[in-house]
Image: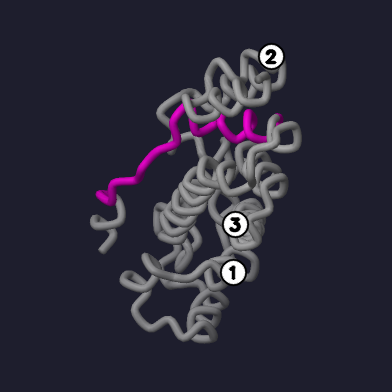
Amino acid sequence: MKKILQKTKINKLTTSNFYDVYGISLLSEKTDLSDKYILSLLLPIAEKYVNITLHAMRCELRYFKRGTESNIVSEPLERNIDILKQLNVKNWKKERLTLNIEKILRCFSAGDWNSEYGGEKWANICKNCIELESYIKLKDIPKICQAIDYLNDLEHNNACYLKDYCTFNLEMALDFKWNCEEQDIFRNCSDGVRELLNFKKG
């Protein structure tokens, strides 16, 4: 099952996905277009963030039972085994690939972890993914944009957790986003968001 997860094809974030969120955030309150149209552009990106985050968290869970990548600990950590029993997880190798987000949060926030894996930083990633899911359900455009912006900055134990799930250099894009002008944001957006900008100008 471990090999299946590693071979799962993940639809990575593109440059336009990244900048579209910021372009929509800049425009959403400055246009007469309906929320329905804006959501048609934003929701697929938001759902991609959720799917990538779930995949990343399930990958990280492979270190949960022993709390370390190298399996130096000869036996599974007792607290982690207790948590799996409480969550009614019987086949860890199989079920970690489909754990729901509430159970994932419990593993990250209550389990024993080696300092380089899992733990508080991943629990924070999980909590913010839960928030994004709630804003998607509410179709709250500003909150969706804010939640994605926050996820873009979140780090696991050594780098931005989204770094390996982008087709572009995330750190460079984050730096550029902080220091650029609005027109530079829109220059990197998709045709759909640029059309939204043209509608505003018109």
Residue 19 in sight: no
* Residue hosting label 2: 180
Counting residues from the N terminus, which is met first, the one under dot 2 or under dot 1?
A: 1
Counting residues from the N terminus, which is met first, the one under dot 3 or under dot 1?
A: 1
* Residue hosting label 3: 136
Give the answer, above or below, for where 136 lies relative to 24: below
What distance separates the C-alpha of mark 2 from that of mark 1? 41 Å
* Residue hosting label 1: 111
Q: Quadrant of the N terminus?
A: bottom left
Residue at image location 54% in from the left, 52% down from the top: 117
Q: Is label 2 or label 3 in front?
A: 3
Residue at image location 72% in from the left, 45% down from the top: 142
Residue 186 horizontal/vertical position (percent): 59, 20
| Residue 135: quadrant of the picture | bottom right
Q: Is label 3 or label 1 in front?
A: 3
Q: As shown in the figure, which amino acid type bears the numbered disc 2?
A: Cys
How many other residues sit within 10 Å of disc 1, few (<14), some (14-19) or many (≥20)?
many
Residue 176 horizontal/vertical position (percent): 63, 17
Q: Which span of residues is magenta-colored? A: 7-26
Give the answer, above or below, for where 21 lies relative to 50: above
Counting residues from the N terminus, which is met first, the one under dot 2 or under dot 3?
A: 3
Give the answer, above or below, for where 187 lies relative to 134: above
Q: As shown in the figure, which amino acid type bears the numbered disc 3?
A: Ile
> What is the basis of the colouring in this image?
one colour
Q: As shown in the figure, which amino acid type bears the numbered disc 1?
A: Gly
Residue 122 in sight: yes
Residue 82 horizontal/vertical position (percent): 54, 82
Residue at image location 24% in from the left, 55% down from the top: 3
> Which is more toward the observer, 29 or 96?
29
